[in-house]
Image: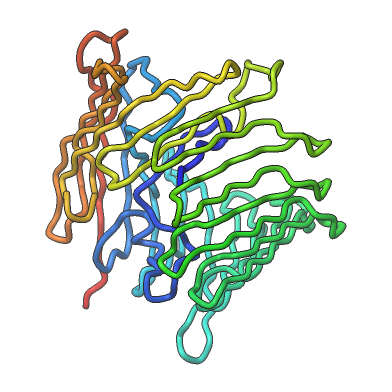
Amino acid sequence: MRVLTPVLSLSLFLFGSLASAQADRKTDAQLDDLFGPVKTVSTVVSMAQVKWQQPGGPTLVLPVWCRDCSYDSDGTKTISGQIANGEFSGELIDIRRDGDGRVTDRVFTSSSTGQVYRHEFLGPFGRTAETDYDPTTGKVQSEQTFAYDENGHLHDSLSVDADGKQMSHCSTTRAKDDTLLSESCSARNVNLEWQQTYNPETDVEHFTTFDESGAVKLTWTFDHGKLISFWEQPDQPHNQPQFGENFSEFGDKVNVDNFSCHENGQCDHFKIHYEYLDPTKKRNPTVAEWRDTDGNLLYAAYCEYQVDSAGNWTHRKVSVFSPELGDRAAYEEDSRTITYWDK
């Protein structure tokens, strides 16, 4: 199914859902794109003074997923944050386990206030419940619950505020092979906000958003991988993107189709091509080029890496391109120190 670009953010990829089956679940270290028995990682990021920003869509320059972090010997994160001017800012994570060593819950404490601000409970497939607190006062702000199907796929999530009133409710149906068949979400007013469906037999996919009255706000349809229709209510505010206007088909994670649609029913189609230092695992992009349908290069990012024996990069140089720049320009340089648990 198409991956939607969230409003006011960039869609990231390369990492699977936290709600996958237990056998496929990644450790926290793996979710941070780290291989091997990583104990600590410490990163220094240097940004050049280059004005470059890609449009909303697939990310060309992947962020450093965790600047300064620590993990226990099974890859569970215990410290997460960033050191700046010699001071650590982030979260301290208290891991609690049952008699068999399985993580049952995690308590997150702010390093700056010393206040607990999140408490997660975990089951065999992922989070089952979460309570979020005000990081200053410690008062409950919201609570969430998560339920999974027999294959370990997340199929229901509910979020309520401190008074128990619904903030959001999402329901998901997946095939055994993890193909997303349907997903729908409602908001605080309990009305349906958006819905996405896919029929693998016909290879037809529909997406629709609704306004507060329940009327269709935006809708599009794909048939056999081709966009055949897009419609949006007229007079939508255009000073910010509308959810559903921008979406991507990642396919093999090498060649990505991105669509940016407009009120007049027309959609701009872009193609993004990735190459990787590790093409088998699709890790560490070396090339990310964003082109229009005529093949004109609009945006690009190029990365050079130094890697250690575990396959984790310890140094990365990033250069970028745009027509405004006219040529590649140095954009970012990162250095990481990684320590490992002795096995």
Q: Tell me the quarter of the picture where residue 57 sits.
A: top left
Q: Is residue 270 left or right of residue 127?
A: left
Q: Is residue 339 left or right of residue 9?
A: left
Coordinates of residue 279 in the picture (x, y in percent): 17, 49
Residue pictured at 44% horizontal, 63% vertical: 178
- View extreme (bottom): residue: 99
For residue 88, above or below residue 29 = above
Coordinates of residue 242 in the picture (x, y in percent): 61, 28
- View extreme (right): residue: 163
Residue pictured at 15% horizontal, 45% vertical: 277
Query: Number of callouts in the render?
Result: 0
Residue pictured at 57% horizontal, 68% vertical: 127
Q: Is residue 247 left or right of residue 210?
A: left
Residue pictured at 48% horizontal, 66% vertical: 175
- View extreme (front): residue: 202
For residue 272, above or below residue 195 = above
250 or 188: nearer the viewer: 250
Q: Tell me the quarter of the picture where residue 237 sits.
A: top right
Q: Is residue 238 left or right of residue 320?
A: right
193 or 75: nearer the viewer: 193
Coordinates of residue 59 in the picture (x, y in percent): 37, 35
Quarter containing the C terminus: bottom left
For residue 4, above or below residue 246 = below
Coordinates of residue 186 in the picture (x, y in percent): 73, 49
Coloring scheme used? rainbow
